[in-house]
Amino acid sequence: MRKIFSFMMVTLDGYFEGRNHDLGWHNTDEEFNAFSSGQLDEAGTLMFGRLTYQMMAQFWPTPAGKEADPAVAERMNGTDKIVVSRTLDRAEWARTRLIKRDVAGEIAKLKQEPGKDIAILGSSRLTASVLRMGLLDELRIMVNPVVLGGGTPLFGDTTFGDTTFGDTAGRIDLELLGTRTCGSGNVLHSYRPAAA
């Protein structure tokens, strides 16, 4: 059975994006890029919510994306992708499948397929929903050494369109798998849902 892991960048005050979807605070360097490449090597499928999918699809297949990081662009474009959205009518980025209904059932089926793990990169609402569905195996949160004072909280919303998945207010206990301190000041925390 394949594992689903999620990777999120977050500020010290708990925001995964700043106001107006600002991601300019992401603290990246060569060490981060090597870590990101390693995560892509672990994944046989990438999963996104609509907003993250649209941002990725508008960048990685373009000449600018390929020039910015040819190795990452090749992996992003060549890996199977899933976009979870109730509002998209089609997904045109190569190797992308759209899930619109029975999200929990479709994701559970994906986990049963053979192959490498499934990675959710970004997509805060999707991450929170999959966690609350009991389908997320590992949560990787990289805390950046910055305080924004406003933005979108990491687990602030678990809705897609007019549908909410799972109990948005319920407590979920996590077990720490490990912590890694990076030379940039970023700190990676890896968790799994605690055993019931």
Image (cartoon, helix red, strand yellow):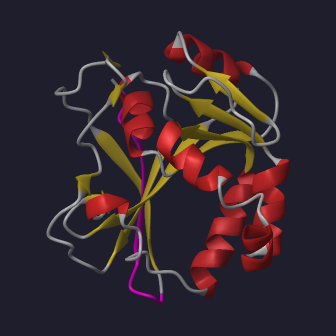
Work out whether 58 lies above or below 195: below
Image quadrant assignment for residue 120: top right
Residue 193 visible from this viewpoint? no
Identified at 43% across, 75% down, the residue is 26
The mark total stands at 0
Residue 158 visible from this viewpoint? yes
Decide if residue 160 is on the left or right side of residue 173: right
Image quadrant assignment for residue 142: bottom left
Q: Quadrant of the C terminus?
A: top left
Range drawn in magenta: 183-195
Horizontal and vertical percent position of residue 47: 61, 39
Identified at 51% across, 16% down, the residue is 104
Decide if residue 59 is on the left or right side of residue 87: right
- Magenta segment includes 147: no
Of residue 149 and residue 34, the one placed in the foreground of this image is 149
Horizontal and vertical percent position of residue 153: 24, 52
Identified at 23% across, 26% down, the residue is 168
